[in-house]
Image (cartoon, rainbow, N blue to C red):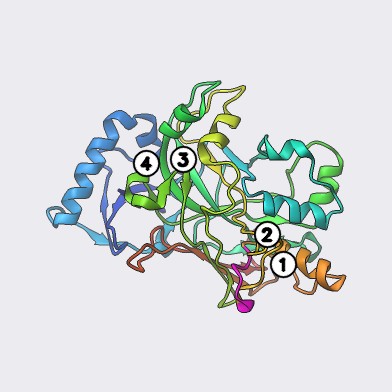
Amino acid sequence: MKLASLRGGRDGLLVVVSQDLAWCADAAAITPTLQAALDDWAHAEPALRSLDRKLAAGEIPRQPFSEAEAASPLPRAYQWADGSAYLNHVELVRRARGAEMPPSFLRDPLMYQGGSDGFLGPHDPIPAGDPAWGLDFEGEVAVIVGDVPMGADRATALAAIRLVMLVNDVSLRGLIPDELAKSFGFFQSKPASAFSPVALTPDELGDAWRDGKLHGQLLVDYNGAPFGRADAGQDMNFDFGTLIAHAARTRTLAAGTIVGSGTVSNRGADGGPGKPVAAGGAGYSCIAELRTIETLQDGAPKTPFMAPGDRVRIEMLGPDGQSLFGAIDQTVDARAPTG
């Protein structure tokens, strides 16, 4: 089943979307918003699946689905907790700051709590802000969970996953070092993120969803050229069950909590830093990784961070070549509101 939220009010208007992303059906007769569905999943899910079957059979009214008219599946959420499950990414960005990789990172996931009171739509512009802030994109995977009890184990956490989607976790690299130096975590360096137009139930993904991971190439294009082709199921040191259980160690997680994977990142074939797509590698899901590798190889980064007019597209295709989640497709806009 594929679900989306069309723009309307603060929490969007829930629709069921056809497998080919061409059509959608209004779910208002069942539940008005995705958050309302998650709050009453035991009753809402069967009714939504019935609506999905009727949409596929052409038995109900439908309308064309436009990714540009979609908000993020949850336009706002009770909680957004982003992990860093790909240690290759963690090692590279820490190396760029001159920070060592503590041994504890190998057994205990990193996680920060981001702002969730309003997300960018998947085709919304990214506010440019001050060029010194170092605007970057981060291609990630995320899940939306139902209620998770405090102290949940990995199996309980995996069973709580309701939906899977993609993320552009917008980051301001120039602000991160000073914030972390205060030993109090990210805040200003993590503005509003954007999520894919459509969120999928795990069973919709078939064999691509296994072991608590989404397997498949995350396609990241930057200014129209392939930038990242990393496999989201490869080199993921902590699966989603582990990430969710980590988040729930000392608190319950309310239905509608979003948990992210962190930047998808693959090691090179030799176990070292990966190569650019143009050089036959898997590329990168953020600019910071490329800049780090440029620094290691050439002594200084060459690729600038994002500027007005730059465009990033994040997507994943199924075995049939069809887009699974729709595309996050955003352009940096100096005119977009920054506050």
The answer to which of marks 4 and 2 sits earlier in the sequence is 4
In this view, the mark in front (3 or 4): 3
Residue designated by label 2: 271
Are circles 2 and 3 on residues that touch, CB within 8 Å?
no
The answer to which of marks 1 and 4 sits earlier in the sequence is 4
The answer to which of marks 1 and 3 sits earlier in the sequence is 3
Disc 3: CA contacts within 10 A as few (<14), some (14-19) or many (>=20):
many
Side of 230 relative to 100 (left or right): left
Residue designated by label 4: 33
Mark 1 vs mark 4, CA separation in Å = 39 Å
Question: Could you tell me which secondary element the residue under label 1 belongs to?
Answer: helix
138 falls in the magenta region: no
* Residue nearer the viewer, 49 or 73: 49
The answer to which of marks 3 and 4 sits earlier in the sequence is 4
* Residue nearer the viewer, 243 or 311: 243
Are circles 3 and 4 on residues that touch, CB within 8 Å?
no
Question: Could you tell me which secondary element the residue under label 4 belongs to?
Answer: loop
Are circles 1 and 4 on residues that touch, CB within 8 Å?
no
- Say which quarter of the image contains residue 79: top right
| Residue at image point 63% right, 64% down | 269
Mark 1 vs mark 2, CA separation in Å = 16 Å
The stretch of residues the image draws in magenta is 278-284
Q: Which mark is residue 144?
A: 3
Residue designated by label 1: 290
Q: Residue furthest left?
A: 59
